[in-house]
Amino acid sequence: MYVAETINYKGTFVESLVEITIFASRKTNHLFIDSSEVITITTISSLQQYLSLNRRQKKGFVPTMGALHQGHLSLIDEARAQSDITIVSIYVNPTQFNESSDLQNYPRTLSQDVLSLVKKGCDVLFLPTDREMYPDGLDKSPPLDISAWASTMEGEFRPGHFDGMARVMYRFIEILKPDKVFMGQKDYQQYKIVDQMSDELDLGAEIIACPIIREENGLAMSSRNLRLTAENRREASKIHETLQEGAERLRAGSSSSIVESWAMDQMLSFGFRPEYFKVVDKDSLEPLDEVEPTREFIICTAAWVGEVRLIDNIWIRPQEEKTNE
Ligand code: AMP
């Protein structure tokens, strides 16, 4: 059992993974503790020491903000399949929150997360503090000009969000030097910006987009779903339905602007507060007026359902005659 640092969990100093796991198992009444291990590291120097001992191994990295669900766990499966060592980070990055209430209300479920990671066979959990990530203060300037990808959709409604996200992802990649980074298609614009950054700055990491994992009713899994009421959770499945029907209408020849305004009206009629519904090019994220049969495109949307802001998208690959939803 390796634990590089003592962690302070909700005011309790937790000395070892066994204690974290027992703490978690008491809370959740899980008596089963997987015998596999996860190395928990909270400082960059310990992490780099570990990495230098394993420099020949192919490293797969899964960055997360915790409150892990099946969507996150699917990224870990993919990372394990494509790497020798799988490193997962849990870090609620303050600079990518444009509203302090969202940061405060962000779900934190560390004890259950550790259990999930142990069961999944993740090799390393990196749990840094703000001071480790931002030793010179909370700098949120992005390491390159991302405005071409970051000014629409999420960027328009969450000013500064992508600046903070790009900064922290640059820092993670710089520290870990992963061979591959596994990200969800759920946050497509985020994936695209990190992919672009890795290319332009020659960071040496391949950025892999993994499919969206959904609840049975079609709702995209998200840590924020924990804050939905039962009724809202049922209703929120209509976001995916609207994306699917929007895609059908585009295929049937409707223009993007007609489909976009139809979808916004639909979501208003469900009692949601939609922010955008956009048909965009898969690479440039430029709006598309109409969809040519051979072109790959994405439809992205964000809407408030009750008190919770949800995002979702659908990726249309016409050549293969299939969607990655
Ligand atoms: P987060 O913890 O929300 O920052 O997400 C961490 C990673 O998990 C990001 O790359 C997300 O895109 C990905 N992710 C979140 N939800 C899902 C989902 N439902 N399916 C697949 N990946 C997801």
Image (cartoon, helix red, strand yellow):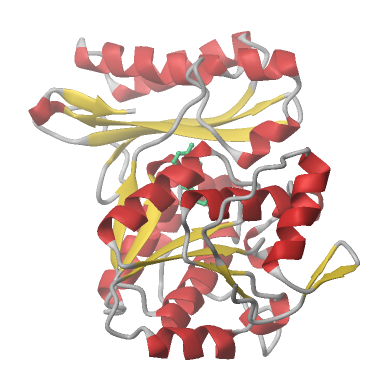
- Say above or below: 37 vs 246: below
- Across and down, in percent, residue 245 comes to 36, 12
- Say above or below: 195 vs 178: above
Q: Quadrant of the C terminus?
A: top left
* Near-viewer residue (107 or 40): 40
- Across and down, in percent, residue 62 comes to 45, 60
* Residue 148 shows in the view: no
Q: Quadrant of the N terminus?
A: bottom right
- Across and down, in percent, residue 311 comes to 53, 35
Name the residue rendered at 40%, 21% in the picture.
Answer: 243
Name the residue rendered at 71%, 84% in the picture.
Answer: 137
* Near-viewer residue (5 or 184): 5
* Near-viewer residue (300 or 32): 32
Count of labels in the image: 0
* Residue 94 shows in the view: yes
- Say above or below: 34 vs 249: below
Name the residue rendered at 18%, 24% in the picture.
Answer: 322
- Say above or below: 209 vs 28: below
Which quadrant of the view contains residue 97?
bottom right
Which quadrant of the view contains residue 237?
top right
- Across and down, in percent, residue 298 comes to 31, 35
* Near-viewer residue (114 or 177): 114
